[in-house]
Amino acid sequence: MNFLPKKYHAVLLCLLVIVFSSGCVLVMGGVVGGGTAAYLRGVLKSKEPTSFDKVWFAVVEVVEQQEFEVTKKESKMGKALIEAKLRDQDKLVYITVKYDKPEITDLIIRVGIWGNEEESRRILKLIHEKLY
């Protein structure tokens, strides 16, 4: 099964590393630049290409404007959480903001116990309107 001379094994290995590494860099660049969101198991997760403070202030502003009934609000170094009831509903909304890097922030939204993708994306859209 050895179809290449030994002197080409190192070259082939280097080429494979370059090809696969550059692909990962391109994918990461696309995710960070676009503020892409993914919904999985009831949770909407988004990487926001902006500072922790800006994302947190946008979240607080959206919660106030939408007249959510805040049941819990805490902010620690690098992590903040709001738990609130949706207006005219019994569903709880959990919004978490986590510091990742100076200009990259994780935003996590869950609506209800099992999640609600439509409502989570609506809230994310409102937050994006404040940010961008």
Image: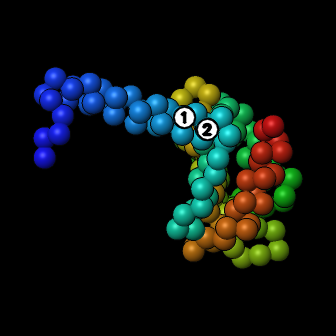
Could you give the CA–CA distance between mark 2 and mark 1, rounded to whole angstroms? 6 Å
The residue sitting at 78% across, 53% down in the picture is 125
Say if residue 16 shows up in the picture.
yes
Residue closest to the eye, 75 or 132:
132
The label on residue 93 is none
In the rendered structure, the answer to whether residue 71 lies left or right of residue 61 reads: left
| Residue 32 position (above or below residue 109) | above
| Residue 93 position (above or below residue 10) | below
Disc 1 secondary structure class? helix
Q: Which residue is mark 1?
A: 26
Disc 2 secondary structure class? helix
Q: Residues within 10 Å of mark 2 (few under 14, many from 20)?
A: few
Say if residue 100 shows up in the picture.
no
Circles 2 and 1: CB atoms closer than 8 Å: yes
The residue sitting at 73% across, 68% down in the picture is 118
Q: Position of residue 112 (x, y in %)?
A: 63, 71
Q: Position of residue 95 (x, y in %)?
A: 64, 54
In the rendered structure, the answer to whether residue 33 lies left or right of residue 65 reads: left
| Residue 66 position (above or below residue 21) | below
Q: Which residue is mark 2?
A: 30
Name the amino acid, label 1: Leu
Q: Position of residue 15 (x, y in %)?
A: 34, 29
Q: Residues within 10 Å of mark 1 (few under 14, many from 20)?
A: few
Residue closest to the eye, 39 or 72:
39
Q: Position of residue 37 (x, y in %)?
A: 64, 51
The residue sitting at 33% across, 34% down in the picture is 16
User: Which of the 4 image quadrants contains residue 76?
Assistant: top right
Q: Image quadrant for the C terminus?
A: top right
The residue sitting at 73% across, 46% down in the picture is 59
Name the amino acid, label 2: Gly
